[in-house]
Image (cartoon, helix red, strand yellow):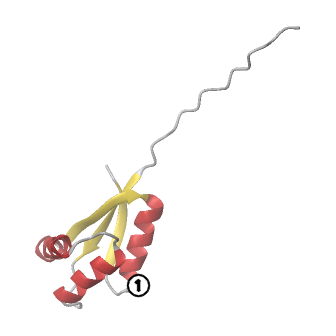
Amino acid sequence: MSTETIKRPETIRKIAPRYRVLLHNDDYNSMEYVVETLMQVVNGLTQPQAVDIMMAAHASGCALVITCVQEHAEFYCEGLQSKGLTSTIEPES
């Protein structure tokens, strides 16, 4: 009786591409509302972090909220948009 070893093909895991969620400044929502909304939509975001993001968007017109995989980025972006904030996603360079 002979025994034959079956070789499995090597699997190479690709790292999922990451996307940046951006918050754009607007003239409609109060700063307090933006901070509250950021904390509600983005899990684990602290108030000081939300304030920093809001102030960066206010000062420069656009701020990075979070960098994550595409599915999460779309979820966060849509969550912010559903609350009346202007948000987009873009691939991380």
Quadrant of residue 35 within the rendered picture? bottom left
Residue 15 higher or lower than 70, as above or below:
above
- Which is nearer the eye, 92 or 2? 2
> Which quadrant does the N terminus fall into?
top right
The amino acid on which the numbered mark 1 sits, given as a three-letter code, is Ser
Question: Extreme top residue here?
Answer: 1
Between residues 52 and 88, which one lies in front from this camera angle? 52
Image point (33%, 74%), residue name = 87
Is the residue marked by circle 1 packed among few (<14), some (14-19), or many (20+) residues within 10 Å?
few
Does residue 20 sit above or below 80 in this rendering? above
Count of number-bearing discs = 1
Question: Residue 68 sits in which quadrant?
Answer: bottom left
Q: Which residue is located at x 36 percent, y 86 percent?
A: 83
**Residue drawn 17% across the image and 86% down it:** 31
| Side (left or right) of 76 relative to 54 | right
Residue 14, relative to residue 68: is it above or below?
Answer: above
Judging by the rendered image, the residue that carries numbered circle 1 is 82
Q: Residue at x 25, y 84 (%)?
A: 36
* Residue that sits furthest to the front in the current view: 1
> Where residue 61 sits in the image (x, y, percent)?
18, 73
Q: Name the outermost residue toward the right.
A: 1
Q: Where does the image place residue 18, in percent across and percent down from the top left?
A: 39, 53
